[in-house]
Image (spheres, rainbow, N blue to C red):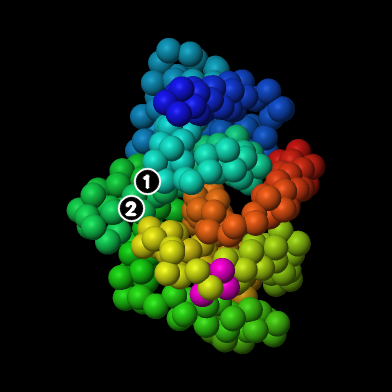
Amino acid sequence: MKSYIILKKYLLILFSLILLMIGTFKVLGYDPDYKNYHEIITNIDSIEKQYEIGFIIISKINNFFFKNSINFVYFIFLLLSLSLKIKVIKEFSNNKIISCYIYLTMFFLIQDYTQIRASVSVGIFLLSIQYIYKNKVKYFALFLISLLFHWSSIIFILIYIIIINIKKIEYYFFILIIFILLNLFPLDIEKIFQNRIIINILPFIGHQYFFNVFNLLNLSLIILDILLLLLYFKYRKYISEYNVLLLKIFTISQILYLFFGMLGLIVLSYRLSSFLNIVIIILLPNILKLIKDRKILFFLIIIYFTCYFFYIYKFVIFP
């Protein structure tokens, strides 16, 4: 038993090192953000006010030692992000192999390979969740650290307010259903606000008039959330407070996606849901462990997330 635990530990380290090298040296090819990051990092002194302190510091260190190469920046951000996520998987997942597979197929390309600043903030958020109830000081300390890497960390505050004030998970389920129904009848944001100033800033905050909220990927996540909520109602006696917390956050993620999607605010919709969806790497294997005959379910999970990976690879990262 002890040797098995040691083996799993080293496999996690090996898994992390392989992804670290793949992301640092762009083994799969250059992602959509690479050229922008190269331009930003090599010219960080002239545009630093637009970016977070952590990113600026790491970029300046990179430029001091490596000039035109930006691999060091990717290495540091990947090292931080992977360390945080693997640490949480090691401590809280009931099935580390499935957790790593979900992370690899759903998040690695989008976050650690492409959105490197947000990826660190997401890792810090995942680590901070355990402190929402038991240590408010640690939670907000991690929030402040996360802000050093990406603006989307502001979601820490919203999550805390919602979780502390809305206790029953039935309310989350009810709100989710309401927003699903509301999105069947899209709103015209111009008619709602009828304000020229607001209308003029819409393009700058990622507004789109024709946005398919129920696209294949996000619809599948909404369905997955509903299934997990139904499993909760069936097995609630056996689900820990921590896993209930993860389920609430995953549901909040789908609600925010639907809310901002309904308004046509596609950037906010995707950014915030992508940030919060990370909890699924722990939540899904932990919930499924409650089901006795779960071999078929694990097989379906492998198929689903494999398809998810190839869709992201083909149509998002390397179209």
Numbered disc 2: secondary structure: loop
Tell me which residue sits at (56%, 69%) in the image: 231
Residue 269 at x, y = what percent?
57, 63
Q: Is residue 36 magenta?
A: no
Alpha carbons under labels 2 and 1: distance apart = 7 Å
Left or right of 67 in this view: 293: right
Determine which residue is flagged by label 1.
127
Which quadrant would the N terminus be assigned to in this image? top left
Q: Label 2 is placed on what type of residue?
A: Gln
Q: Is residue 285 visible?
A: yes
Q: Are marks 2 and 1 in contact (CB under 8 Å)?
A: yes
User: Residue 299 versus residue 291: which sits nearer the camera?
Assistant: 291
Tell me which residue sits at (69%, 85%) in the image: 185
On screen, residue 58 above or below 249: above
Query: For residue 219, what is the image quadrant?
Result: bottom right
Residue 88 at x, y = what percent?
41, 42
Looking at the rendering, the stretch of residues picked out in magenta corresponds to 229-233
Determine which residue is flagged by label 2.
130
Which quadrant would the C terminus be assigned to in this image? top right
